[in-house]
Image (cartoon, rainbow, N blue to C red):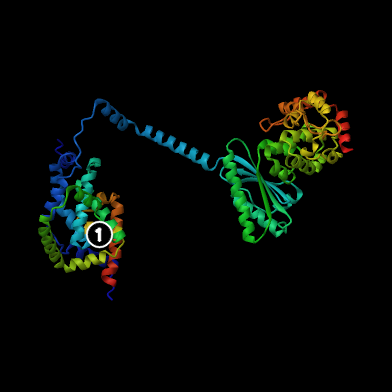
Amino acid sequence: MDNNHPEKDLVAQAKHCPEAFGRLYDQNYSAILNYCIRRTGDVELAQDITAETFVKALKNIGRYEWRGGSFSAWLYRIAGNELSSYFRKGVYKTVSLEHLRESQGFDPSSQVELEEELIAAEEQLARFQEFLSCRQKISQLPTKYQEVITLRFFACKSLKEIAEILGKPEGTTKSLLHRGLKKLRSFFYHH
Amino acid sequence: MMKISGKTDNEKLQNKLDTLALPEIQMPAHQQRLREMLLASSCFEKEITLSPLQQKVRAGIHGIRPVAWKLVATLAVLLLTLGTYATFFAAPQVVASLTLQVNPAINMTISSRNKVIAVNGLDADGQALLVGLDLTSRNVNEALRIIADALRKDGLLSPERRIIIALHPIGDSLGAADLAVLSGNVRRTIDEYLAGQGISLAVTSSELTAEFMETAGDAGLLPADYVDLVAAVGAPLAWQVLSLYRELGLSQESFKEKLDDITEAIIELIEEKGLSEKEALTIIRKAIKADPTLEGFDGLLEIPPRETNAVENSESVQSDDEESGSDISDEKMDERGESERPRRGQIKPNVPSKHEVEEYESDKPTHDVPKPDAAGEEMIETEEGAGQSEYELQESAGDYQE
């Protein structure tokens, strides 16, 4: 047992223990979901991307190697790749999730509850008009700037954490953020 | 529009983003549903206990020093580079030779990648035509179109001419089937070019062996000289005819000059007189030998068709058969059981006896044997003694002519 890195042990267990994976999931679900909502401004799409992120994490956790970083950074990176794919193609397909659903069957009893929850979440999001306006402006930036700005201001990550998520040096991340803000400034004050 | 300094703008924007109220949405039903799905998945690895050997192997792979990895990577890159060089940049393999004659005559050496490696004119006109044409390294089809275009511009693709193509393999890498494919490809390219230009011109193509081309080269012949012979009797027999040049020690000029006559004669002997290829070749050989200058060649071959040679006198036939062992007497016997073989003085004098044919065949050059040698020439001398003397041959030829 590594007392300095309890997450390391939990990740090691999660490779073959569903309960351990469940704990990692519970710790990170909300953060990833809200990151996706804040990037896309679409609750249903964010649900799909979050689900796909965790399915991919589950499928690939066997190959995950602990290198001193946090497990959540890895999840943010998977989510970031999924979001980039959506922004690049304009559509999103939950391939891994559908595969998992097909293998487990479909449970119609929970659908009503899920739909009600979705409607409530959309209504809640609609109340954040200033945020939505800001997000809309950010979404006009190239993806690399969107990513660094949303991680910094919408996911409240430090430069070090952003660098870890993006797999880039901290200096590069800082420059990206600076250039991104400079570009975003024109949308706020010159348009 | 408001204009503020860059620094003020940035700070203002950062403050705005820092203080922005963010939605914090909780979706417990979705979270629970997804959790159930994930944990029910069969993706979880079974805990694997590695055997001591597997642990050793794994430790070995991870335990290799970075220097060793670098060495392995360098070697891999080196091998890859060499492989790439050998595949794409090493000297191309020569597989075939193509001769195109209109006239002019041009020869191209072709690589295994269907590219022209070298090109040269086989006569003065061919050399002149190639001046200014950049054909090396081009695809064969492309090179042929360029040559055909140059020929057309020089007015050399007129209807009375014909295009002759001869292909032969170089080395062993091109099989007969591959050569046929290449030949078909060449032929199609020429035909398509002519059709595209609205030119009607005869095109003849032959696939020959390297030995054939060597023999033809020795005799100073170009495809136009022997293409009709090949078309009429086939490449193997044509090669034996061409081999007579070296076998009988003829001069290049006289052989080349008389090759048309020889071609006509052998076609006539086979097709009109009904002789076998062996018999026809023996007659031609005898005729040339009787007159190595080839001046009286035409006269020596004036032979009536086999059917008209039958005569009544069987004594002479008997003696002929005894001498020569000809199988012709076996073929035609009258009702008295006597051979219809014509007697001396009345029979065609130059039809070779079975003995002569067999003896010649036993030692003649075949398409399996590269070329005739000194032993072949010796055999010819011996054959005369065993069969007819040169005097007898000329005498009987004279008899027939009477």
Tell me if B75 is positioned left or right of A152 in this view: right
Q: Residue at x 29, y 56 (%)?
A: A85
Q: State the quadrant of the C terminus of chain B.
A: top right
> Please, what secondary structure does the residue beneath circle 1 have?
helix
Res. A154 in view: no
**Residue A146: x, y in percent?**
27, 60
Q: Chain of mark 1?
A: A
**Is residue B358 or residue A134 the one in the foreground?**
B358
Instruction: Find the residue positioned furthest to the bottom.
Output: B1
Q: Residue at x 16, y 54 (%)?
A: A31
Q: Which residue is mark 1?
A: A149
Q: State the quadrant of the N terminus of chain B.
A: bottom left
Question: Compared to A94, does B307 lie above or below?
Answer: above
Q: Amino acid at mark 1?
A: Ile
**Is residue A182 or residue A38 the one in the foreground?**
A38
Question: Compared to A189, does B263 lie above or below?
Answer: above
**Residue B68: x, y in percent?**
38, 32
Indicate the quadrant where residue B399 lies. Answer: top right
Res. B350 in view: yes
